[in-house]
Image (tube, rainbow, N blue to C red):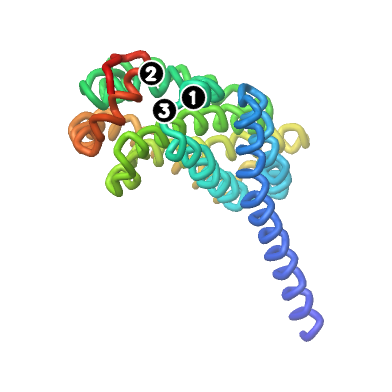
Amino acid sequence: MPILALSRISRWLNRKYRLLVEIVVLLVLTPIVSFLLFYSGGGLFLPIVQSLIIIYFFIPEVYRNNLWRASGLVLFWSIIMVVSVSSIFAFHGCDLVLIHNVVNGWNYSHEMFIWLVTGKGAEGDISLFLIPKIKELIVFILVSFLTAGMAGLFMGAILLNYMNTYYGLLIWASNYSPITILMGWPIYAIIRVIGYVFLGTVLARTMIVLIQNRGLRGLNDKQYKTMLVIALILIILDFILKATIANAVYQPILKQQLDSARLAKCQCVLGITCYSY
């Protein structure tokens, strides 16, 4: 009995230590890499290196069938990405050079600021966002499956970078309004990220099991099925909420928080309208 107890304690300490190392490395390395590469010009190299950091820990955890831990690490990495990238723009404001350092940063922010002011655009119009989102989901499923989740994480890094560019600009344009800080990342977008992370983890596990020649029997466990069902529910919920509350709730509230002078500068930098300020 004492030997069995010591064995269990040893395994528990090993798991705790590994998780602690993973958390510390992500917490330290992700913002350092993000800042260094961002201020060095950004571009595609930025999301490539950012995604490699999480891939290093994600793949072994999926291989060990620790699906919840793998997903948790990705979500933790996502939170660090939010803080790291958005803080740059919340500090510098609407700087055209810095915005162009982010892949799709200018285009996405341009679209979102038009939506903020006018309520028009794909953000809350299902007739405009449904087909592009379905195509995006199909691409994500294919590349995540074929690369055991690695390309999906790269896509996620690109998406997080340009969404956080807009989020940081929004915080600056609202003059650091607490409401904007809390609502700038809408609930449906948060749900979408969690759903995609769970789905990517399931797809990564599927490919790894197939590579191991274990067949579909290797996927017949409760956590795999539960995560897949939750992922699908969250992705569907994202579509529903985006279509119903983006324009009805988020757009009018966020618009009220905008500082007119700062908004004018962002509109000018983003090529929307340009007034003297």
Work out how far the residue at label 3 is from the one at label 1, CA to CA, in angstroms: 7 Å
Q: Quadrant of the C terminus?
A: top left
Q: Are marks 3 and 1 in contact (CB under 8 Å)?
A: yes
117 up-or-down from 254: above or below: above
Q: Nearer the viewer, residue 179 or 124?
A: 179
Local crowd size for mark 2, using a 10 Å CA cut-off: few (<14), some (14–19), many (≥20): many
Q: Are marks 2 and 1 in contact (CB under 8 Å)?
A: yes
Earlier sequence position, callout 2 versus callout 1: 1
Q: Which residue is mark 2?
A: 270
Q: Are marks 2 and 3 in contact (CB under 8 Å)?
A: yes
Q: Residue at x 59, y 29 (%)?
A: 152
Q: Quadrant of the N terminus?
A: bottom right
Residue 46 visible to an observer of this rendering: yes
Q: Residue 267: x, y in percent?
A: 32, 20
Q: Residue 173: x, y in percent?
A: 32, 34
Q: Nearer the viewer, residue 59 or 89?
A: 89
Residue 218 visible to an observer of this rendering: no
Kindly state the secondary structure of the residue where label 1 is placed: helix
Q: Residue 57: x, y in percent?
A: 70, 46
Q: Which residue is mark 1?
A: 99
Q: How many marks?
A: 3
Earlier sequence position, callout 3 versus callout 1: 3
Task: Choose mark 3 or mark 1, whichever is in front.
Answer: 3
Kindly state the secondary structure of the residue where label 2 is placed: loop
7 up-or-down from 264: above or below: below
- On residue 94, which mark appears? 3
Q: Residue at x 68, y 65 (%)?
A: 16
Work out how far the residue at label 2 is from the one at label 1, CA to CA, in angstroms: 9 Å
